[in-house]
Structures are given as C-alpha cells and as structure tokens.
C-alpha cells in the first residue's frame, strides 16, 4: 500500500513517513496541499494521505475539499494529523470529507489504530518506531454525530471567552510534558519543573507561534542553542554524537512550539487562529510586548522556558 504524507515541516514528514514505513507502507511526501494535488494530478495513486492542517500555499482543509471535489479521487482515505485540537475544527475536517483525525503529539499506536479502524493496516504484527508515550489523541468523531451549527462562537458567553492570560502554568506544564513524552523522549519523566533559582540562557534560540486573540498573543519557547541541538537529536532519534544542521534545529524547535501552541489554542475560543512557527536567535517579543506568564522547565537538567505574551 502507498501513503502520501503532507506537512510543511520536513521533520514531521520524516516522523510520519517513518511511522507508516514501519507499518508496511511505501511513502511519498509533499510540503503543502498544492504539491500533494500536483502528485495526484500527475497520476500518482495512494491508498491514504496523512495531512497537516496549517501549511502555506494550500492548507490541509483546502486539500481535503479539493480532493473530495474530484470523483476520480473518491477512494483516497484522508487522515488529518494536526495540532488543531478543538472539537469544532475536528467537526469541520470530518464534514469536509476527512475520514479520521489524529492530534499532535501522536504515538505510533494512535496512527496504527486509525489505520486498523479504516481497514488499511497491511501488517497486523510489526515493529513500530519508538515514539511511544502518553500523547494526546482525538476521541472518535463521526461527521454524522455533529453539524457545524452545533459549534458557534455565538453560543459562548463573554465569560467563556477566556484569553491567553487565563492559561495557567500547570496547564502549560502538562501540555509540555505530553509533547516531550510523545515526540522527544518516547517516555515521560525527562521534562520536569525547574528546581528553583534563576534560569540562565546564555546563547538562546527562540521559536514562537502567534494567536489571533484580542489583543494578539504569542507562545514562545526559549533554550540554549546547545540544548536545541540535543532536542533535535532526540526528536529525530539520532545518536548523541551525530551532527545536526541548522535547518533541522529550526524545523524541530519550530515544530515543538507549534504543537505547544496548538494545544494551548485548544483552551481558547473556537475562532482563534494560529500562525506558522518561526525561529530566531533574537527574541521576537521586544518593545510593545507584555509577558503574561513564564513557565520554567528542565529537560535532562537543561533549562527550557515557555512564555506567553500579548503583542
């Protein structure tokens, strides 16, 4: 069987493709929905496509709609693999024609269980990539069980419209712990709260995503560049001595904060949007930005700082 992996992050394409390869699928990759459509239009045939939502050029939902509009592609199974965790977004994707929905951070088991449910898993017993952990996973939803009208911002009172300032430190810590267990370490316990005292990040790398709250807000991740290098090796399952490229580090660090942002976004109103991740050695949250909260963490003894801002 053949699978198409669609994600603007090369790191996530690699992870999803490795997971599918371990399940017996031959895989191809595309960096956005437009590239994926080009493969289909060129006559490539796939049994399943695993699709990120937030991508440049053509996002995942637009790709689903485009595929469902073409009769000749009606047999292609579509699985969303995304940080979009709100129930309303799940309903939108299923109503547009997606068959299943997996929320990042995912485990290999969450992917294989969806494929088993859809009757697409070619191997019942297989050696799976070591991405186990207690990652978040969407409950089973059926488009028949919901309608888009069931979820509306008009149904929320002003008291329900909590903004980023209402996100508590222990919620951020819980999200970070799940992300690291599922995506970085393969087990829980290696990311902990900072033991106390000042946090010194002398040679920082920052990655962030912005949210369309009112006022606009930001989720930012900061660590020493050496820690970011080690994170990249752990994420990509590399040996400790293997060299990493700057592109890999930026991609991995950006994907981690993207998953942080998507899961924090799920705590906010349905209409809140999320930008694509960015990374820089210079902090983006300068003049005019106000820090709402700062969560100090330790990963294998090295400091990591998750900060929430208005911008």
Image (tube, helix red, strand yellow):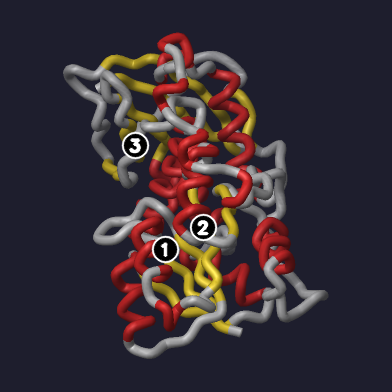
SS for tag 2? strand
Numbered mark located on residue 127 in the image: none
Q: Is residue 245 visible?
A: no
Q: In the rendered image, which residue does mark 3 sit on?
A: 273
Viewer-nearest residue: 256 or 228: 256
Q: In the rendered image, which residue does mark 1 sit on?
A: 64
Q: Is residue 19 visible?
A: yes
- Residue 201 at x, y percent in the picture: 40, 29
Q: In the rendered image, which residue does mark 2 sit on?
A: 80
Q: Is residue 18 above or below residue 298?
A: below
| Residue under the image location 33 percent in, 88 percent down | 42
Q: Is residue 167 above or below residue 249?
A: above
Judge depth for marks 2 and 1 and give the one in front: 1
Q: Is residue 147 above or below residue 25?
A: above
In space, the residues marked 1 and 3 are separated at their CA atoms by 19 Å
Q: Is residue 194 above or below residue 77?
A: above
Circles 2, 1 touching at the beta carbon (< 8 Å)? yes
């Amino acid at each position: 069987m053949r699978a198409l992996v669609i994600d603007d992050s090369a790191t996530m394409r690699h992870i999803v493709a490795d997971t599918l390869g371990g399940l017996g699928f031959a895989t191809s990759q595309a960096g956005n929905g437009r590239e994926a459509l080009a493969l289909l239009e060129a006559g490539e045939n796939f049994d399943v496509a695993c699709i990120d939502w937030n991508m440049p050029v053509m996002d995942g939902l637009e790709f689903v709609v485009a595929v469902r509009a073409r009769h000749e592609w009606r047999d292609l199974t579509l699985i969303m693999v995304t940080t979009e965790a709100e129930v309303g977004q799940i309903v939108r994707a299923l109503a547009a024609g997606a068959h299943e929905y997996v929320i990042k951070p995912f485990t290999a088991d969450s992917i294989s269980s969806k494929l088993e449910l859809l009757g697409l898993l070619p191997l019942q017993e297989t050696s799976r990539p070591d991405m186990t952990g207690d990652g978040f996973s969407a409950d089973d939803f059926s488009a028949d069980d919901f309608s888009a009208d069931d979820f509306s911002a008009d149904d929320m009172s002003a008291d329900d419209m909590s903004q980023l300032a209402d996100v508590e430190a222990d919620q951020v810590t819980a999200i970070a712990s799940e992300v690291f267990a599922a995506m970085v370490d393969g087990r829980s316990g290696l990311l902990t709260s900072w033991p106390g005292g000042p946090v010194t990040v002398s040679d920082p790398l920052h990655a962030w995503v912005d949210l369309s709250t009112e006022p606009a807000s930001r989720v930012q991740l900061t660590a020493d560049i050496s820690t970011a290098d080690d994170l990249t090796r752990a994420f990509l399952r590399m040996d400790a001595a293997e060299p990493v490229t700057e592109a890999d580090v930026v991609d991995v660090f950006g994907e981690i904060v993207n998953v942080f942002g998507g899961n924090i976004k799920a705590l906010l109103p349905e209409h809140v949007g999320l930008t694509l991740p960015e990374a820089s050695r210079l902090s983006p949250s300068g003049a005019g930005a106000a820090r709402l909260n700062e969560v100090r963490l330790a990963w294998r003894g090295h400091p990591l700082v998750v900060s929430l801002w208005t911008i």
